[in-house]
Amino acid sequence: MSADTLEKVRKVTVEELGVKEEEVVESASFTEDLGADSLDVVELVMAFEDEFGIDIPDDEVGEIKTVGDAVTYIDKKKSA
Amino acid sequence: MRFADKVVVVTGASRGIGKEIARAFAAEGAKVACVATTENGANATASEIGNGAKGYACDVSDSAAVDSMIESVVADLGTPAVLVNNAGITKDTLILRMKDEDFDRVINVNLKGAFNCIRAVAKPMMKARYGRIVNLSSVIGLHGGAGQANYAASKAGVVGLTLSVAKELGSRNITCNAIAPGFIETDMTEDLPAEFREHVEKTAPAGRLGTAADIAPAVLFFSSEESAYVTGQTLTVDGGLFL
């Protein structure tokens, strides 16, 4: 897991969801722990796409449940 | 001034109902982004209504053009509080004579154009946790019209779009409503046969065709802060023609 990716994911998550940085731990679920609803998730995914210059198809969004999932997914996409 | 310093985007603002809507907003203090297909048309309305209004040339059926137009509005005037999807065209003819391009063009401008603009403003409105979206449907979308299969389908589609947007964005304090004008004196209805005008004058309880000034106040209501608890509705403004 790339520390750089994790740092950026945390930054984007804080900006998009308006949560505290210390809450954005790897195991935190966006919907259950960080209070994101379906619209928030879409905004978050779009922000990740912008931040990392990747495309996250709708049918792969389900893989991203936690902060750690997002980092793993983004690292995989970037190395692909 | 009900809309002091609010940024309002009005499409189809160069003439007819759209121009009157833009004028009414500016009179209530709004900074209006006047969108029209030609730069001249857009700028003419903007300079006429004043109060910091700005013209934007954009074909609403072109989603990339709409995205960049909305980006420019945000940069020039600020995040839109109100979007009025008024741009619309007709290409009337009986179904047997209706060409693919007649059908597609009307759908692309009237329905997809509204969708394009909504998608483009949704993000900034969601971030702002505030938005008022008003779509211009038509009594033809609710009742049909011989020779207007394309137009009726597009305007009925606008009603469905309105309902979905209301449900999808409601949690972000964004409302979406529609206005269904009846027969309004504009360039669009000027070619109607004289018998039809007489029919409207005899049948409508109001006893006359409508004017753009009859529509604008309804649009301003749906655009106001006070209408926060009204969403997904279609208000018919037709002088009672279809009662």
Image (cartoon, coloured by chain):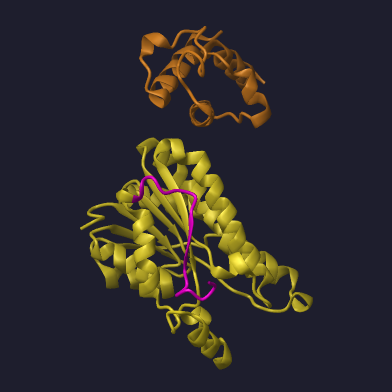
Chain colours: A orange, B yellow
- Which residue reaches farthest left? B1
- Nearer the observer, B212 or A67: B212
Q: Is residue A24 above or below residue B205?
A: above
Residue beneath the point at 52% across and 46% down: B165
Q: Residue furthest bottom?
A: B194
Is residue B74 visible in the rendered image? The answer is yes
Return the residue nearer the eye: B178 or A60: B178
- For the question of whether residue B14 can be seen, the reply is no
Residue B26 place in picture, x, y as percent: 27, 63
Q: Residue at x 58, y 19 (%)?
A: A74
User: Start and end of the magenta stretch?
Assistant: B227-243
Which quadrant of the rendered structure holds the N terminus of chain B? bottom left
Q: Is residue B34 magenta?
A: no
- The count of marks equals 0
Q: Position of residue B57 (x, y in %)?
A: 44, 64
| Depicted B192 relative to depicted B10: above or below | below
User: What x and y, as percent, mark residue A26?
Assistant: 50, 8
Residue at image location 40% in from the left, 10% down from the top: A23
Task: Give the quadrant of residue B172.
Answer: top left
Give me the residue at 60% from left, 21% from top. Answer: A78
Decide whether residue B228 is among the magenta residues: yes
Horizontal side, residue B105 vs residue B57: left or right = right
